[in-house]
Amino acid sequence: MERVLEDFIGHWRLSREIVHGDGTRARFGGVAEWSADGAYVERGTLDMGTARFAAERRYRWTEDLEVYFDDGRFFHTVPCTGGQTSHWCDPDQYDVTYDFSAWPEWAARWQVRGPRKDYVMTSTYRPDAG
């Protein structure tokens, strides 16, 4: 089934695991919210083992599931049926797979490689009443 922006609008519980190439891990737990105008914001706590701190991220999604950074730069387009896409952020390559097969729970798995970055980040979204 094809996903549209309206499917994402609302509150979601967000859990994320980040596994670095050297084996170290970090975890994020919090909430994500899409508003009707496509504004996306996530807030929560990032736990990096010995360090724990508040974290926030913002994007803008369009009706065509194009994702833009908060400053207006294009990021990538979410495949409406799930699947793979990518983003080149010189000098690092970002490859993502969106999995909507267990909707309304869904996940995004990023593999990031380059001279500055080397990690896999898996984010799982579950509906939340808010």
Image (cartoon, rainbow, N blue to C red):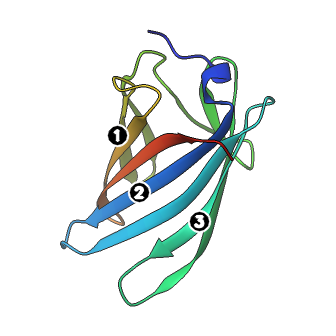
Image position of 23 with respect to 39: above or below:
below
Quarter holding the N terminus?
top left
Q: Tell me which amino acid carries mark 3.
A: Gly
Q: Tell me which amino acid carries mark 1.
A: Asp
Which residue is rendered at x = 34% and y = 63% of the image?
Answer: 117
Which residue matches tag 2?
Answer: 16
Which residue is rendered at x = 18% and y = 72% of the image?
Answer: 23
Of mark 3 and mark 2, the one earlier in the sequence is: 2
Image position of 49 with respect to 60: above or below:
below
- Taking the image as shown, residue 69 lies to the left or right of residue 83, namely right
Q: Quick one: label 2, few (<14), some, or many (20+) residues within 10 Å? A: some
Residue 2 placement (x, y as % from top left): 49, 10
Which residue is rendered at x = 38% and y = 45% of the image?
Answer: 94
Which residue matches tag 1?
Answer: 95
Residue 36 placement (x, y as % from top left): 79, 29
Q: Tell me which corner region of the image, top left, top right, bottom left or bottom right, holds residue 102.
A: top left
